[in-house]
Image (spheres, rainbow, N blue to C red):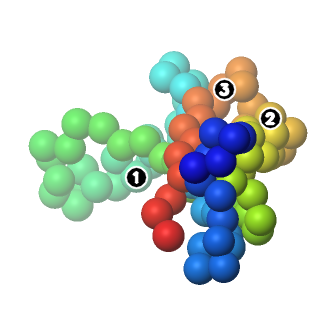
Amino acid sequence: MNSAGGVAPTAANAATRIEVRVELKPGVVDAEAESVQKSLGLLGLRSLRGVTTARVYVLEFAGLTTAQAENAAREAVDRLLANPVIHRVAIRPLPD
C-alpha cells in the first residue's frame, strides 16, 4: 500500500483493472429487458420473475494505484459512460 491509499503497481501487475457496471435505475423503462423477459416466457421459462440489462466496462490503467484507477474510472463515468439521471453505477477493482 502507498500514501495515496492504494496498492502501488509493480512490474508484475503494471495494469490496474477496474470494472464499471452501468444499469438503469429502478423505474426507468428497460425495453430490452422487457423483450427478453417476454421471449423467455414464450420459451417456457414461466417462473422467471424479472430481467434487467447492464453494460459492463473493464478499464485497464497503467502505472496507477488502485485508488487512482478508481478515481479515473469515476471520471470516465461522469464524463461519458453513464447519465446520473437514469443510470446507477458500481465501480470495483478486479483481481490481477
Residue 44 coordinates in the image, percent (x, y): 16, 57
Looking at the image, residue 96 lies above or below residue 82: below
Q: Secondary structure at mark 3?
A: loop
The residue under label 2 is which amino acid type? Asp
The span from disc 3 to disc 1 (Cα, nearest Å) is: 20 Å
Instruction: Using the image as rendered, state which of residue 92 and residue 23 is in the foreground.
Output: 92
**Which mark, by number, is residue 36?**
1
The residue under label 1 is which amino acid type? Val
Which residue in the protein does label 2 denote? 78
Looking at the image, residue 12 lies above or below residue 73: below
The span from disc 2 to disc 1 (Cα, nearest Å) is: 29 Å
Q: Is residue 30 left or right of residue 48?
A: right
**Which mark, by number, is residue 86?**
3
Q: Is residue 56 among what the camera can see?
A: yes
Q: Residue at x 58, y 49 (%)?
A: 1
Q: Is residue 22 among what the camera can see?
A: no
Q: Counting other residues with Cα less than 10 Å from the Cα at mark 1, is it few (<14), some (14-19), or many (20 or more)?
A: some
Residue 32 coordinates in the image, percent (x, y): 52, 48
Q: Residue at x 65, y 71 (%)?
A: 10
